[in-house]
Image: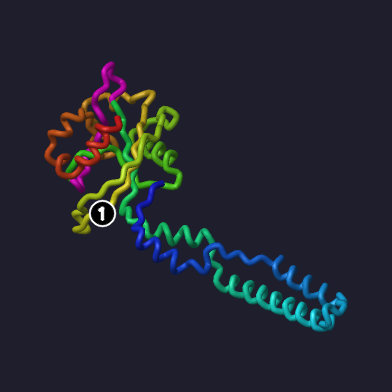
Amino acid sequence: MKILIDDIKLNLLLEQKKQFIGRKVAWDSVLSAFSFLISVLLASYEDFFGISGIVFKTIFVLLGIGFSVKSIIDITKSSKNNYNYEDLLVDINKLNEIAHNHSIVVIRDSFNPFPNRYLVYEDKSWNCQFFLNYKENPNNEEFIRNHISRELKIGPDDIELSYVAQKLHEKYSESAKENKVYSHKFYLAEIKKFPDQMQKDSFKCDGKTYYWKSLAELEEDKNVQKKNMDILNYVKELF
């Protein structure tokens, strides 16, 4: 999945979290510190260049104590600030400027010897004819296949779904009254066996009206020109 992040916002996040990123305090560091301290306490040191062995031992003991204390402090801080790579990934995804993630499904009239039409439906809320589309789901392909199966009354085994491409684009949102970034994944759904009803120029299924339209017909539709021309252009490019 593609995401879109402002580099300034990302740098600010990394600056805020830099003290936690890459920090991994393991208990073996504490064990190493105590092992060093114990070995120093049990060891005996000879005089060296007139310096008493007791002085060397005292220095090493202090180093061992300091190392042990630091390891314990690091473990305590790490437990209080339990920020890991998963937390960082969540924070990065929160910066994602993509407003909507949708999947566009293209179905051709392959029951004809020369297929040149695409399946669209009448969206009453937008008063426009759209390609089949679904909000992105973690199990996206299975989710899409199951929805097509239920909506068009086709067995899931008769639907072959293939991913084509992902497109990011910015356009004006009528509801939000501002420009937003949209992500659309495009899929091609090939139907192995069309029900007789679907082979009509238009048909209804569960109260929704569907049409088989050529790209030229859709381009001439003023509502499509105004509300869905970006998607239509991607379909022309990809299919």
Q: Secondary structure at mark 1?
A: strand
Observer-nearest of 87 and 192? 87
Farthest front residue? 49
Image quadrant in which you'd find residue 99? bottom left
Q: Depth check: give the residue in front, 107 or 60.
A: 60
- Which segment is the magenta one? 109-126
Say if the magenta span includes residue 123. yes
* Residue for point 83% across, 78% down: 48
- Amino acid type for the residue under numbered disc 1: Lys
Question: Closer to the camera, 2 or 156?
Answer: 2
Which residue is drawn at the image coordinates 39% and 39% (left, top)?
144
Task: Answer whether residue 157 is magenta in the image.
Answer: no
Measured along the vertical axis of the image, is residue 163 above or below residue 100?
above
| Residue 86 horizontal side relative to residue 196, left or right | right
Residue 151 location, x and y as percent?
Answer: 34, 37
209 w.r.t. 192: above or below: below
Q: Residue at x 51, y 59 (%)?
A: 86
